[in-house]
Structure formats: C-alpha cells, structure tokens
Image (cartoon, helix red, strand yellow):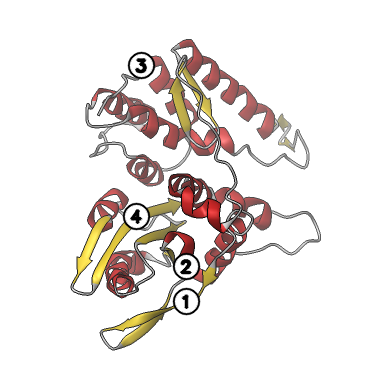
Amino acid sequence: MSNVRLPIAVCAAVAEVLNGSHDSLNALFEAAGAPGPPPDLAHHSKWKTWLQRVGNDPEVNSLEVLGNIIEEFMDLPPLPSSNSFDNILGIETPDPVEEYNKKKERLVNILEEHGFRYFRGGRLIRIGQPEPIDIEPIRGEQDEGSKPSSLEGLLRIIIRGLPRAMQPLIHRRKGSQSLCFTSEYDIQDLLHALLRPWISDIRPEEFCPSYAGSNTRMDFLLPAHNLVIETKRVRDKRHASKVGDELIIDIEHYSKHQSVDHLWCVIYDPELYITNPKGMVNDLEGMRSTPEGNVDVKVIIVGANA
C-alpha cells in the first residue's frame, strides 16, 4: 500500500478542530482506520501524535484515514444560534457558525499549503491528482446491473452519512415534531428513504430460509445486485458485546438464500458502546462459506462522529 506522510503542521491543525472525549475520539480514529493502540498522551498531543503515526505506517492509506477523521467537521457545520451573541454574565459568546467558518478556513488553507485538497464525503487527495468524480444516480434496473462499483460507492456515502441525514430531522423548526432514531426500525426507514431516489427495486422484509429452527426477514434486498442490507442499532453496552454474534447468525441465514451474494451489515452505534470497532469489522468482513452457500460480507459501523 502506498502511504503519504502527513506533515506535522497538518496533524496539529486537525488536532485543533477535534472535539470530544478521549473515548469518542478513540472510537473515531479506530473506525477511520488509524493503527492502534491510542497514544497515552494529553488531549491535543494525543491526536497529533496519532496522525503522525498514520502518516508513517506503510500499511495505512493515510489520506483515506485523515479524510474519514475530518469528514464530520468539514461537512457538518453547527446549527446557527438563535441569538448570535448571548450575554452570559456580561460576556459575549461568539456565533458558533462564525467560529466554525474560521476554523474550517484555517484547516483548508493548511491542507492546501502542504499539497492536499479536501472534497465532500471524506475524500482527500494530493493537489495535482485527478479530482474525485461524484457518483451518477443509478436510475434503472439495466443501469443497476452494469454499475456494481458505483453502487458500492453510493452505499458507502449514504450509510456513512446517516448521522448527518438525521440532524435536520432531529432538530426541526419550532412547532414541528422532531423525529427520533432510537430503534432499528427508525434506522431502516431513514436508510430506505435515502436509497429510494437512487435504486428502483428495493424489497424490504424479504423472508430468508430458516436456520437453527428460526426464520428471519431481510431488512432490504436489492435483487439487481444480489445484495442485502442488514441494520443493527446498538442499544447499550450489553448489546454491543452481542451484536457480532447476532450478525454471525444472520450471515448463516443469508448464505442459504439463492438471491444473496453480498451482505452489507450497517451497525449504528450513536453512543459508541462498541469498544473495538475495527476488530469487529475485521472479524466479520470477507467471504463467508457455509455448506449451503457463500456470501461476501461488508461491515460499516456508524457512530455519532461518523
């Protein structure tokens, strides 16, 4: 794998814009693909040092990892304040949007000074390389069958963007009822809505053959691609320790289905209860074979910082 060294100024600038607890940022770095374990350092030094490690590891795609880490900051500005300056004990509080724009402009400038350019969706390239091409909509069954690679890219963007898609539905205008995403059905409904403009044939709750004496329903079957999407929402720490076992059973189910060659497991973990997301992905992903058939498994864990 070809890696790109990350200059110390870039690492420091990114560390400046990261907000969150050690646990939440540890999970963000691990989900982004940063090699562990986390450095045992103070807050600012920790993230800068970890990013330097990313840039020095020949087995890591440093630009992909860095893009994943800064994606939320770059693509999701804060909500505007109802009052740009709230007078608290006589101290004026700056407008969060104005402060965000200053931080973003500084980060963009430092990236470009060192030869990097960011594109929406967590895509970071070296200046001079071909710019990434946005995915074309997949409009019909004929197109769907001929563009599996575009479909994969589309799915990754939609799935990783679920937390951003939730924001305007959770924080609605005054007088409008806010939506909550507290169950797997809530996540399924949102994902279904986001997929429908792009994919013509989506079949929710298709039955799967029985396994170990029980039947199951697929969350979504995309028959033109022989692909199933299975969603999980992590409820608590106890469930976090069991979700991998649940997916192992699901994999056994889906391997029996003649119309399923690919299984995408979407795990929504808003409270970051999964302590080792990278390990879970490594354990579950890949081609899984059973006496009844094979299925290629992909796993995406989406947290509040995704």
Q: Residues within 10 Å of mark 2 (few under 14, many from 20)?
A: many
Residue under circle 3? Answer: 8
Where residue 99 sits, quadrant-wise, is: top right
Reading the image, the residue beneath label 1 is 206
**Residue 59 appears in view:** yes
Q: CA distance from mark 1 to mark 2?
A: 7 Å
In the rendered image, residue 131, in percent from the top left (x then y), is placed at: 51, 24
Is there any visible trace of residue 183 in the rendered image?
no
Given the image, on which type of amino acid does mark 2 rest?
Answer: Leu
Specify which label sits upstream in the sequence, 3 or 1. 3
* Name of the residue lying farthest toward the left: 291
Between the C-alphas of marks 3 and 2, the distance is 46 Å
| Separation of marks 1 and 4 at Cα, in angstroms | 19 Å
Kind of residue sitting beneath label 3: Ile
Residue occupying image coordinates x 59% and y 21%: 105
Q: On screen, 122 above or below 101?
A: below
**Could you say whether the residue bearing mark 2 is in a helix, strand or loop?**
strand
Sort mark 4 into few (<14), some (14-19) or many (20+) by Cα contacts within 10 Å. Answer: some
Crowd around label 3: few <14 · some 14–19 · many ≥20 (10 Å): some
